[in-house]
Image (spheres, grey):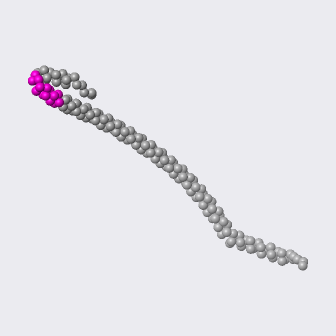
Amino acid sequence: MTISLSWPQLLIELISVLLLFSFLRAKAFPPILKAMRDRQERIRSDLEAAEARRREAEAMKAELEAEVKAIRERADQVLARAKKDAEEQARTILEEAQRESKRIISEAEVEIRREREEVLASLKAQIVDISLSVAEKVLRERLDAESDRRLVGEFVERIEVPQ
């Protein structure tokens, strides 16, 4: 198959293409170009908005990180203060317990001394009573009360109760 071209046919086709191109240029290309420019502008605008949102998100992230850091620092301060207060309270309780135990021991020592003195006084009284009973027996036998009292007094004075 051979293709033959005739100049008139070629000229008609060329004119048709030129007419079609000029029609397209006048009627179809402007809306297409406008749509492409609008699309390009919308893409540029979307990219700029996305970049602005990204910068805003980064700024918000930095702000949130700073807030988290500040909150952690405040929490650490609160914990340190609570620990210090707890240690202070524990020390105060311990000191109060030590003072109370010293007071109780001191009161107990005073009570022990008082009871010891009472026991010693009671013991001395019993010794005196026993001595007087013995002396009374002896006196009945001797009938010399004055010398017996002197002997009992000397006996009581010589008795030393351990303290």
| Nearer to me, 101 or 145 | 145
| Nearer to me, 124 or 48 | 124
| Residue positioned 36% across, 40% down in the render | 93
| Residue positioned 14% across, 21% down in the render | 150
Q: For residue 135: magenta?
A: yes
Measured along the vertical axis of the image, is residue 40 above or below residue 122? Answer: below
Measured along the vertical axis of the image, is residue 77 above or below residue 27? Answer: above
Q: Position of residue 60 (x, y in %)?
A: 53, 53
Q: Is residue 109 left or right of residue 12?
A: left
Give residue 19's quadrant in the image: bottom right
| Residue positioned 56% across, 57% down in the render | 53
**Residue 145 seen:** no
SS majority, magenta:
helix
**Residue 18 seen:** yes
| Residue positioned 38% across, 38% down in the render | 91
Q: Residue furthest bottom?
A: 1
Q: Is residue 97 left or right of residue 79?
A: left
Q: Residue furthest front?
A: 141
Q: Position of residue 145 (x, y in %)?
A: 10, 23
Q: Position of residue 78 (x, y in %)?
A: 43, 45
Q: Which residues are magenta?
A: 129-145
Measured along the vertical axis of the image, is residue 8 above or below residue 161? Answer: below
| Nearer to me, 18 or 39 | 39
Q: Is residue 16 left or right of residue 82?
A: right
Q: Position of residue 23 (x, y in %)?
A: 71, 73
Q: Residue furthest left?
A: 143
